[in-house]
Amino acid sequence: PGGGDQVLTRMILKAAGIDPDKDLQAAQLTQPEGAMALTDGNIDAVFWNFAAPGAAVMEVEATRKVKLIPLPEEVVQKVVEDNPFLLPFTFKPGIYKSVDKDVLTIADGNYMVVRADMDEELAYNLLKTLLENKDAFMDVTPQAANFIPELASKGIIPFHPGAVKYFKEKGIDM
């Protein structure tokens, strides 16, 4: 309830010409509550914002047929233009058992947050190790496949000097 999921959902609905306060009946549920309500047939749809593959989707898929609905390109374009920290994202076939073709959606970035007083070399080496050992990192979390260093400039928080050094070294505009 509340938070980023609700804000992003309202942005998407408004860009699609849907007034979330008038055109639908919304329920503010946690991810587990939403999964249960969808599974039980108590709600028709849910907006979730988490790294894929998400356990909530797989939980619902285990007992009920579901469909991920692609967002219209013009809706994605409007939301991304109005909110430069968001980006178009496509779920590829196989990410979930219900996905057999590309599904266009919107993603937000994930950030590694460190103390401002972290040593510059330590921050540099931490970022370098993660980004240059992506295969090993994917053994820990499959979401690492979606790390795209070139999107660093989309960040909305100040970068640590160690991160700036790494990205500049790689020719990535900040």
Image: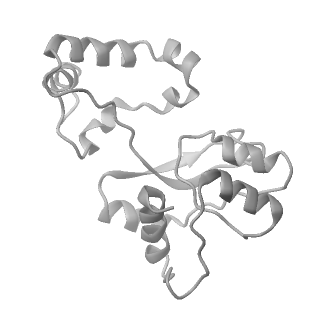
Residue 40: x and y in percent read 82, 62
State whether residue 90 is above or below residue 166: below
- Total label count? 0
| Left or right of 42 in this view: 90 | left
Residue 80: x and y in percent read 36, 60
Can see residue 74? no
Residue furthest to the bottom in view is 22
| Left or right of 108 in this view: 24 | right
Which quadrant of the structure image shows residue 153?
top left
Residue 55: x and y in percent read 67, 40
Q: Which of 171 and 145 is in front in this view?
A: 145
At a point 79% along the width and 48% down the height, the residue shown is 61
State whether residue 123 is above or below residue 10: above
Quadrant in the picture for the C terminus: top left
Q: Nearer the viewer, residue 156 or 116?
A: 116
At a point 67% along the width and 57% down the height, the residue shown is 33
